[in-house]
Image (cartoon, helix red, strand yellow):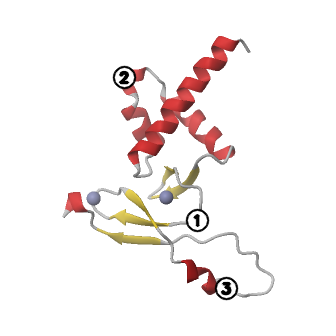
Amino acid sequence: MSPLRNKRVTRQKQLVYDCVIDRKDHPSANEVFVDLQNTGIGLATVYRQLSAMVDEGILKSFEHSGQIRYDRLVTQHAHFVCTVCDKIWDVDLPEDILLMTPNVSDIDVEGLELTWKGICKACK
Ligand SMILES: [Zn+2]
Ligand SMILES: [Zn+2]
């Protein structure tokens, strides 16, 4: 791979990454693509960069309403979902919630997903 090509890949990755970080609302690949339209980056590239960053542990992804959404926060946290606009915000998880981890034999707990639902400021 030529250095030039490397450079371009890095720039695309940076654009996609910055978009997810700036939005704070867990965008889908398509929303990232729409935001970056004037940069000329293609939808397939957006998908590829996002999934590469999930593989590298830089971003997290999860499914919401049948869509993959991308998360800039890779540590354990809860979400608030607006039931009107479907935007998702990060919320702190109470530390003592881990005390509620089920103590059942023969299972391995891998994590916790907690989502609060409501109506955001913009939709009220
Ligand atoms: Zn809303
Ligand atoms: Zn999140």
Identify the residue position indicated by label 2 in the image.
38
- The residue shown at (50%, 34%) is 16
Residue 77 located left or right of residue 54: left
Considering the numbered disc 2 on the image, is that residue within a helix, a strand or a loop? helix
Type of amino acid under label 3? Pro
Which quarter of the image is occupied by the C terminus? bottom left
Identify the residue position indicated by label 3 in the image.
102
Cα–Cα span, label 1 and label 2: 34 Å
Type of amino acid under label 2? Asn
Type of amino acid under label 1? Gln
Crowding around mark 1 (Cα neighbors within 10 Å: few <14, some 14 to 19, many 20+) is: few
Residue sitting nearer the eye, 49 or 94: 94
Considering the numbered disc 3 on the image, is that residue within a helix, a strand or a loop? loop
Q: Nearer the viewer, mark 1 or mark 2?
A: 1
Which quarter of the image is occupied by the N terminus? top right
Crowding around mark 2 (Cα neighbors within 10 Å: few <14, some 14 to 19, many 20+) is: few
Does residue 67 lie above or below 77 as drawn? above
Image marks 3 and 1: residues in contact by CB distance under 8 Å? no
Residue 43 located left or right of residue 34: right
Residue 36, percent from left and from top = 40, 29
Residue 70, percent from left and from top = 51, 49
Residue 48, percent from left and from top = 60, 34
- The residue shown at (59%, 60%) is 75
Residue sitting nearer the eye, 62 or 58: 58
Residue 43 located left or right of residue 6: left
- The residue shown at (60%, 72%) is 112
Cα–Cα span, label 2 and label 3: 48 Å
- The residue shown at (40%, 72%) is 116
Earlier along the polypeptide chain: callout 3 or callout 1? 1
Considering the numbered disc 1 on the image, is that residue within a helix, a strand or a loop? loop
Q: Nearer the viewer, mark 3 or mark 1?
A: 1
Identify the residue position indicated by label 1 in the image.
76
